[in-house]
Image (cartoon, rainbow, N blue to C red):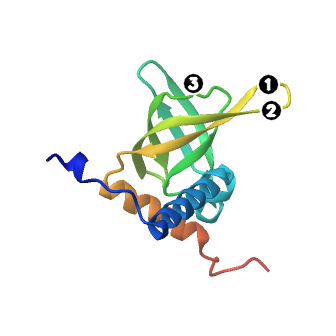
Amino acid sequence: MSDRDKWTAPSADEAEEMRAADAAQEKADARSHEERRAAHRVNLRVDVSLQTEDNFFQGFSENLSEGGVFISTMAPPSIGTVVNLSLTVGADENVRVQGVVRWIRVDENGEATGCGVQFTDLSTQAERAISLLIAQSEKDPLFFDV
């Protein structure tokens, strides 16, 4: 007898639990992309260079999360393009990561103004550096201008 022949239909309670789980997943999927990431994103402006297989782009970040970065640039790579990023965070400190362009922002005239890049295959060192950048940007300054 194969494993397939041993399968039995779920009980009424199991079926209800499965329906509830499916409904919860559908509800989570229906939330907008902005809602899903809003709590984890911080405004952070750093210089960014993007390198693809064929081109080199310059821009700056507008915001950053542990999952990705929005890069303001007048010439973003196409959606789906794999990019190597270098985030300049200090005078001579760079965080190097790889990502994929997931969306492009355009202005009212249809001109590109930037792109959203999702990080992929982050090294432990890059994860720590990004987490540190986020933590530092969320801290209140110790000194204030008076």
Residue count near mark 3 (Cα–Cα under 10 Å), binned few <14, some 14–19, many ≥20? few
**Residue 65, image x and y in percent?**
54, 57
Q: Secondary structure at mark 3?
A: loop
| Circles 1 and 2: CB atoms closer than 8 Å | yes
11 and 111: which is toward the camera: 11
Q: Secondary structure at mark 1?
A: loop
**Residue 45, image x and y in percent?**
62, 52
Question: Type of residue at label 3?
Answer: Ser
From the image, which quarter does the C terminus lie in? Answer: bottom right
59 and 42: which is toward the camera: 42
Residue count near mark 2 (Cα–Cα under 10 Å), binned few <14, some 14–19, many ≥20? few
100 and 16: which is toward the camera: 16
Q: Is residue 137 above or below residue 23?
A: below
Residue drawn at (48%, 36%), measured in percent from left and top? 100
Q: Residue furthest left?
A: 1
Question: Type of residue at label 1?
Answer: Gly
Q: Which residue is mark 2?
A: 107
The answer for how far apart the CA atoms under marks 3 and 2 are is 16 Å
| Residue 110, label in figure | 1
Residue drawn at (65%, 60%), measured in percent from left and top? 38
Residue drawn at (48%, 67%), measured in percent from left and top? 12
Q: Which residue is mark 3?
A: 78
Residue count near mark 1 (Cα–Cα under 10 Å), binned few <14, some 14–19, many ≥20? few
Q: Residue furthest top?
A: 54
Q: Residue furthest right?
A: 108
Q: Is residue 118 above or below residue 44?
A: above
Q: Secondary structure at mark 2?
A: loop
